[in-house]
Amino acid sequence: MMTVTQETTIPDTRYWRFCAWMGPLFVAVFYVCWGLLGHNFPPFPPETPAAEVAGWFRENANGVRLGMVIAMTFAPAYGVWGYALAKVLERSMGVGSDNLIVQLARLGAAWTTITILVPTSFWLTAAFRPETLPDWMIEMLYDMAWLLIDLAYAVTSVQLFALGIGFLADKRSKPLIPKWLAWYGIWVGFMFVLECVMPYFRNGAFARSGILNFWIEFIIWMAWVPVLTIYAIKATGRIERGE
Amino acid sequence: MTGTDKPLMPVWVIWFALVGASVAGFVLAEGFGTAHAAASAAVLLAAVKIHLIFGQYMEVRWRHQPLRTLLAAWLAVVSLILLGGYWLA
Amino acid sequence: MTADTANAPRQPHEGHDIPGDSGVWFFIIADMCAFAVFFLVFMAGRAQAPQVYETSRTMLDLRFGLANTLILLTSGAFMAQAAREAQKAQWQRARLMMIATLVTGLPFGVSKAMEWQAKLAHGVGLTTNEFFTYYFIFTGVHFLHFVIGIVVLLVLIGMAEKPGVAEDKRLRWIESGGAYWHMVDLLWIVLFAMLYLMRAA
């Protein structure tokens, strides 16, 4: 028998929706600031000469600084979003906030925030005083940031798997979050494993700029955020109505 | 809705067909026939095997639309990728 | 479901539209699409360097490829039979068929390990050339799917006769797990053709 606690106070629910919208906001800001201003969407291919990467940083230092500063400021939005989803997850599973799966969903979101903050600081470092840094050092900072942001995939997989497992445990005849979306998240979590071969390649599909390890991996993750947000907001309404 | 699907064939009959097609593809790859004919046949045999698996093992029948169409589309695209990529090389 | 209806002969997939769970099918289709991208990437690479790819292809042992194919086809046959037994609520027979699926499927892992070991022993690895990059990565990812399939089989074998699990749920799980296992099989069929059989002139 499932016991569902009901949150009926309006402020509580409003915060759920507000926090849920932090997800799509994060994606939009991240794309513009980290992606476009930071020359990360797509990134420089690994075989790009160091002089070219360094030259770009010297010419666009202010743009990179602005992009990374805003990206770092909005990185916590991903964590906030993750916590909002965890509230819906509690209702899906009919459990309290101390449930292990719910905690892992929150933890995965929090870890992901860190793994966004740290590499963006490396890109920012490359743009802080690029005129005094040798080309190879700027290239190394760029590489280091990419190696971390890509190979930290597993922390996000923890969030994806926890949410997927939890949403699949929903016993409602019409689940709060549809099963296909839960499975999609689990699939994305597994797909991230391909990043493991990224350090071995300077070109081709598996390089950091390749069709598989950049385009597909980033797009399937970024697409998941707004879609899940819409369902989470609809679910909030259902929870308010006691469903 | 159920009128158009024929009964499933016995599993061992399908198995024989799949094994036979696999051996045929292997023999062709080992050197029989021209390379182009052998490679094309290998792809077509693979497509036939997968079509059999969809219908007889996974039991996705014609009444199970749109899943059946989705799987057929995947098979067509993959076959085109293999054949097209081969012939364009 | 009453005892009468539980034991009555049922139509396949009675009560639901497709065999298995629709969410699992979503996962299966998504995975098949990912592999379709792998196939596209490989064939695009092959079109640009057909000689390198052909020379590399001839370094593969087709007998391993055929053996792997026959292993998975046989294992798949047992899984298909398991689903048919489950549809007739013959849970003991379904469980036996799934055990046979597992036993006949496990040699794939051994065969793959032997094949990779043989390549590595000859100095052929992930970064030897583009063909072998794709060979190791795609067969490696496929192998991960195989391992997951083994785990799924073990779970299904454990629950096939478990009291307290509703029969329609048991059937749906077995059909879903079976669909996943057949996906592992059919993806190998494509890999076998693409990596081993498509010889150039």
Image: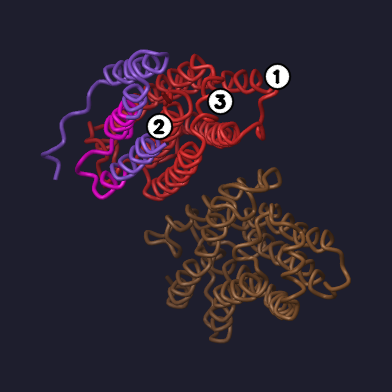
Q: Which chain is purple?
A: B
Residue, disc 2:
C186
Kindly state the secondary structure of the residue where label 1 is placed. helix
Res B54 quadrant in image: top left
Indicate whether residue B48 is drawn in magenta. yes
Q: Name the amino acid type tagged 3.
A: Ser
Q: Which residue is mark 1?
A: C121
Q: Which chain is brown?
A: A
Decide: few, some or many residues near mark 2? Use Cα within 10 Å; few <14, some 14-19, many ≥20.
Answer: many
Nearer the observer, A117 or A38: A38
Q: Is residue A9 magenta?
A: no
The hue used for chain C is red
Chain bearing mark 1: C
* Range shown magenta: B44-71
Quadrant assignment for the N terminus of chain C: top left
The count of marks equals 3
Residue under the image location 45 percent in, 33 percent down = C184
